[in-house]
Amino acid sequence: MEFTCTTRNVRMSPKKVREVTRQLLPRKNKAGEKEGMLVSKAKAVLSAIPRKSARFIEKTLNTALHNAEHIGAEWSAAEIQDKVADLKQRIENHSDENGVIQRKHRHLIAKLARLEAYLDNGGKVDTSKLRIINAMATAATPLRRWMTRARGGGSVILKRCTHIRITLSDDE
């Protein structure tokens, strides 16, 4: 099952944040398969990086980890089964006579798979096996400031902002 956390509008340039997120991305193992970094190792790596962006990413990682730990406390098994039944009904409603689902509703299939995987695990997530499968920093809407220039003119100063998104997975 996947757990995601997004920190929005961080007042830092995306370029500076991407330098740190690249170190957390999945790498190829000896068998040639992509393998994500364990959360415990990622925390150690981030604590050793002396950059402000590493602190923001570490906070986002901790929030994603807490999302994974507390999902079982917030939902009961009956609520999740109701959600699964509701998703199956919505998928059935949005598919044509051949059983092909409309493109804008394909995310429902992924959501259904995540909830069914969670039910198969007995409603528990082993946080020691969580891996980072995606870490990205995207540009947010920048703040625009004006600096006065010669002859009554002005120029724009862009104060760039970033959205940080980290996805964890317990899949082997």
Image (spheres, rainbow, N blue to C red):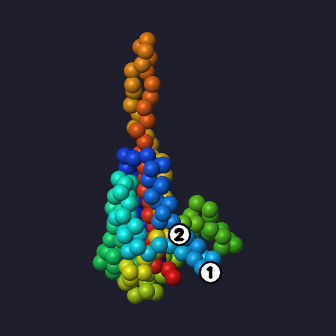
Which amino acid type is marked by label 2? Pro
Check disc 1 and report the residue beneath it: 31
Secondary structure under badge 2?
loop
Asked if one can make out residue 82 in the rendered structure from this viewpoint, the answer is no
Which residue is at the front of the view, 126 or 15? 15
Circle on res. 72? none
Secondary structure under badge 1?
loop
Which residue is at the front of the view, 48 or 111? 48
Check disc 2 and report the residue beneath it: 26
Residue drawn at (51%, 82%), measured in percent from left and top?
A: 172
Residue drawn at (43%, 86%), measured in percent from left and top?
A: 121
Residue drawn at (46%, 86%), measured in percent from left and top?
A: 120
Quarter of the image holding residue 123? bottom left
Q: Residues within 10 Å of mark 1 (few under 14, many from 20)?
A: few
Quarter of the image holding residue 92? bottom right
Residue farthest to the right? 98
Residue drawn at (33%, 61%), measured in percent from left and top?
A: 59
Where's residue 3, x and y in %? 43, 70
Relative to 54, residue 119 above or below: below
Which residue is at the front of the view, 149 or 5? 149
Gap between marks 1 and 2 measured at Cα: 14 Å
Where's residue 100, x and y in %? 66, 70
Where's residue 51, x and y in %? 37, 54
Residue farthest to the top? 151
Residue farthest to the left? 73
Asked if one can make out residue 44 in the rendered structure from this viewpoint, the answer is yes
Which amino acid type is marked by label 1? Ala
Relative to 114, residue 58 above or below: above
Question: Which numbered disc flags the more N-terminal residue, 1 or 2?
Answer: 2
Where's residue 40, x and y in %? 38, 74
